[in-house]
Image (cartoon, rainbow, N blue to C red):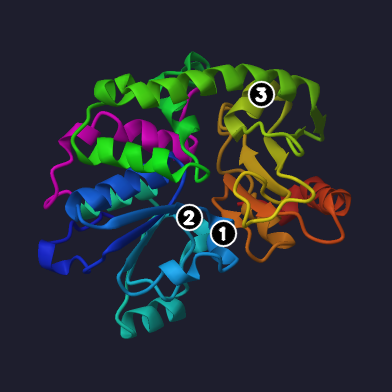
């Protein structure tokens, strides 16, 4: 479906942008702030929003981008499969004065970009947007991932743990910084160097703490400060795995502590395999125990539920074993 660009008078009067804290959310927020420079930008994440921790930030003057749907916002912009409002929700939201745009675009940032393309100058973002799209939709090739170019490094610096740094990135992007200027910024360059070093440690950890069960690579990052996405694990697993499950967070963690989140799991298809995406709906695993879980069919996540990690893992492995009938797209 072609996205019809908005006219200026069709854009809701938002004064706050609430966005996910990954690369997609960053660029989505930058696009929205480029149109409305006075808007406040706040970064969060799906579990935080679904748990109600940011309810006080969401009202009819708030635009949500790259996050789960919330009926109290004024404008909703997203592309995640499990976040799509139902027809009834969409009708009630519209009747109460809300505006929602949900489209199956490769990134939420792309949707925001296309909606505002005729009324916002974003030419400096054009060279970067394809990488934002590819990162969020599993379109990064194995060669590009292993090369670890500057935008891939930049993506790993994005975090809700450091709102000042995220605000700095938004300021650079909305002020017209090119990719070269962005990665040459002193603050950004230092963060990028740090994540390059962290990736080396993370890859060593993956090799030592990953097991492959029935073509599912299970990687344990829990109880460590290290972070990883599915690309690192599936690149390591290669042709031995169709998907991966990454366990992260802390047994004594809490959503209110951004540096020590609770235990969670992320599921990713191995996009480096031929036809590696679009085979299994992994979001069914992410939502099978946690009603607040979700994401894309090929990339999603959830929190560990009682009675605990081992029981959750047994449940997911049972689903995975029966994937031909339970997870088929």
SS for callout 2: loop
Q: Nearer the viewer, residue 77 or 43?
A: 43
SS label for mark 3: helix
Report which residue position mark 3 lands on.
Answer: 202
Taking the magenta stretch, the answer to whether it contains residue 93 is no
What stretch of residues is rendered in magenta? 117-142
Residue 250 at x, y = what percent?
75, 45
Q: Does residue 141 sit above or below 52 in this rendering?
A: above
Q: Residue at x 18, y 40 (%)?
A: 122
Between disc 3 and disc 2, whose residue precedes? 2
Can residue 110 be seen from the camera position used here?
Answer: no
**CA separation, marks 3 and 2?**
27 Å
Dot 1 or dot 3: first in sequence order is 1
Q: Nearer the viewer, mark 2 or mark 1?
A: 1
Task: Residue under label 1, please give it.
Answer: 48
Q: Which residue is mark 2?
A: 80
Q: Report whether 253 appears left or right of 122.
A: right
Question: Dot 1 surroundings within 10 Å: few (below 14), some, or many (20 or more)?
Answer: some
């Amino acid at each position: 479906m072609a996205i019809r660009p908005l006219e200026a008078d069709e854009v809701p009067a938002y004064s706050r942008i609430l966005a996910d804290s990954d690369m997609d959310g960053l660029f989505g927020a930058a696009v929205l702030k480029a149109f409305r420079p006075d808007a406040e930008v706040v970064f969060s994440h799906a579990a935080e929003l679904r748990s109600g921790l940011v309810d006080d930030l969401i009202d009819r003057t708030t635009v949500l981008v790259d996050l789960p749907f919330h009926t109290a916002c004024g404008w909703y912009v997203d592309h995640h499969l499990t976040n799509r409002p139902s027809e009834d929700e969409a009708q009630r939201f519209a009747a109460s004065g809300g505006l929602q745009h949900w489209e199956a675009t490769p990134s939420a940032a792309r949707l925001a970009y296309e909606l505002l393309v005729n009324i916002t100058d974003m030419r400096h973002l054009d060279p970067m947007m394809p990488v934002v799209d590819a990162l969020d939709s599993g379109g990064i090739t194995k060669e590009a991932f292993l090369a670890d170019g500057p935008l891939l490094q930049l993506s790993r610096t994005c975090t809700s743990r450091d709102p000042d740094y995220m605000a700095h990135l938004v300021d650079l992007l909305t002020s017209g910084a090119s990719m070269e200027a962005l990665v040459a910024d002193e603050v950004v360059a230092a963060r990028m160097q740090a994540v390059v070093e962290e990736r080396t440690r993370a890859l060593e950890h993956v090799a030592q703490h990953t097991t492959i069960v029935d073509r599912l690579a299970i990687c344990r990052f829990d109880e460590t400060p290290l972070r990883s996405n599915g690309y690192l694990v599936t690149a390591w697993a290669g042709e031995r795995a169709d998907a991966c499950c990454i366990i992260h967070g802390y047994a004594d963690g809490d959503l209110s502590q951004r540096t020590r989140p609770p235990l969670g799991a992320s599921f990713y298809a191995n996009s480096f395999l031929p036809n590696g995406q679009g085979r299994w709906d992994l979001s069914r695993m992410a939502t099978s125990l946690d009603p607040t879980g979700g994401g894309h069919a090929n990339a999603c996540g959830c929190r560990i539920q009682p009675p605990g990690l081992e029981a959750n893992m047994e449940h997911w492995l049972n689903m995975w074993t029966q994937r031909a009938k339970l997870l088929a797209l």
